[in-house]
Image: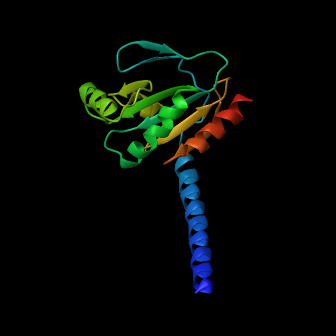
Amino acid sequence: MKDKIKKYIKEGIFFIIILIIIVNGISYYKSLDLNKNKLDIQTFTLLDNNKYTLVENKPILIHFWATWCPICKVEAPNIQELSKDYEVITIAVQSGSKKEIEEYLAENKLTFNVVEDKDNFYSQKFNIKVFPTTLIYDKDKNLKFSEVGYSTTIGLYSRMVLVNN
């Protein structure tokens, strides 16, 4: 009986490792087309029509998401948590009206900075085709990390710590 349990545990671990490798490979492949240029936008207009100017000499995380995206919904608490400690801008793409986005944010208790990409300006500028997509820039606004798909809270924090040093 113990041998069977050990066998199942080994197979489970092997499966998880293979799955992680495949998911990271897909993420890497999908990130090849992203705009890797230096971030040249300094000011964003948020959902509430306030202007948000990026802080000089601080890293920034830019997160593209959509209200209809199930992975985005699962990942949103991770972005919310990170936004308490770091500069974060999220961009809602193909997510309905401003009111629908506001309702989604309220329903999910999300308070991070949101830009409505109603004319797809940002998604085209950054060449975003898959949601969620997360871009992390260093203090000089050079792209250091990109993630297409789900990112864990610890993964996001570790990347921000790396670019902050």
Tell me the quadrant of the picture where the C terminus can be found.
Answer: top right
**Rendered residue at 68%/34% (across/down):** 161
Side of 155 where 108 appears, left or right? left
Left or right of 48: which side holds 26? right
Picture coordinates of residue 162 (x, y %)? Answer: 71, 36
Give the quarter of the image for residue 157.
top right
Q: Is residue 89 above or below residue 56?
A: below
The image position of residue 84, as x and y in percent, is 53, 26
Q: Could you say where residue 31 lies in the image, as x and y percent from the top left?
A: 55, 46
In depth, the one of 17 and 111 nearer the eye is 111
67 vs 38, left or right, is left
Q: In the picture shown, does residue 2 fall above or below 116?
A: below
Residue 127 lies, with reference to residue 56, above or below; the image says below
Name the residue at 49% across, 41% down.
133
Q: Residue at x 44, y 24 (%)?
A: 113
Query: Is residue 115 shown left or right of residue 104?
Result: right
- Compare residues 165 and 146 and report the one nearer the observer: 165
- Identify the residue at horizontal 40%, vertical 12% (top origin): 50
Is 13 in front, or is 56? 13
Q: Tell me where residue 79 appears, x and y as whole percent.
A: 49, 35
